[in-house]
Structures are given as structure tokens and as C-alpha cells.
Image: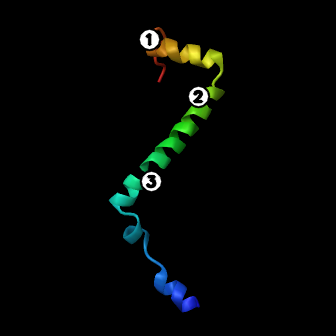
Amino acid sequence: METKIKNEKRSVSDWFTSEKLEEFRPTIEAAAQEKVDRLVAAWTPEFRAALRKLREGRIENRS
């Protein structure tokens, strides 16, 4: 049985082709967007206000 398993193993480069990436793209993008949505939802109103001001150029970038 172990020999059969060893023979069936393939490297990632053999399996993960551009076609597979396209097949998984919607799942990957949905998972990434969900993570971003959770992180943004955790931001405090004060942080969002400061970020908005920074984007509008009302706060100097201190870096």
C-alpha cells in the first residue's frame, strides 16, 4: 500500500498549473476579501477618521 501512495505523489509544480490557479481564483479572492472585510470592520471610528484625513491630505505623513 505504501508503494502505491509513493507512486501517486506529485510535486506541487506538476499539480498547481495556471489552469488550477484560474479554477481556484474565485475561492482565493473571496477568502482574501473576507479577511480584509474583517480587518476593516475591526477598525475604530477614530482610526477610520484619521485614515480619511490622511487620504485627503489633511495630516502630514510623519514617516
Mark 2 or 3, nearer chain start:
3
Q: Residue at left 55%, top 35%? A: 36
- For the point 51% across and 14% down, which residue is it? 52
Label 2: state its secondary structure.
helix
What crowding class fits label 1: few (fewer than 14 Cα within 10 Å), some (14-19), or many (20 or more)? few
Give the labeled residue for mark 1.
56
Tag of residue 24: 3
Identity of the amino acid at label 2?
Answer: Val
> x and y percent of residue 54 in the render?
48, 15
Residue at point 65%, 28% (across, down): 42
**Image height check: is 50 above or below 7?**
above
Mark nearer the N terminus (1 vs 2) = 2
Image spot of residue 57 (x, y percent): 43, 11
Residue at numbered disc 2 = 40
- Dot 3 or dot 1, earlier in sequence: 3
* Front-lying residue, 58 or 35: 35
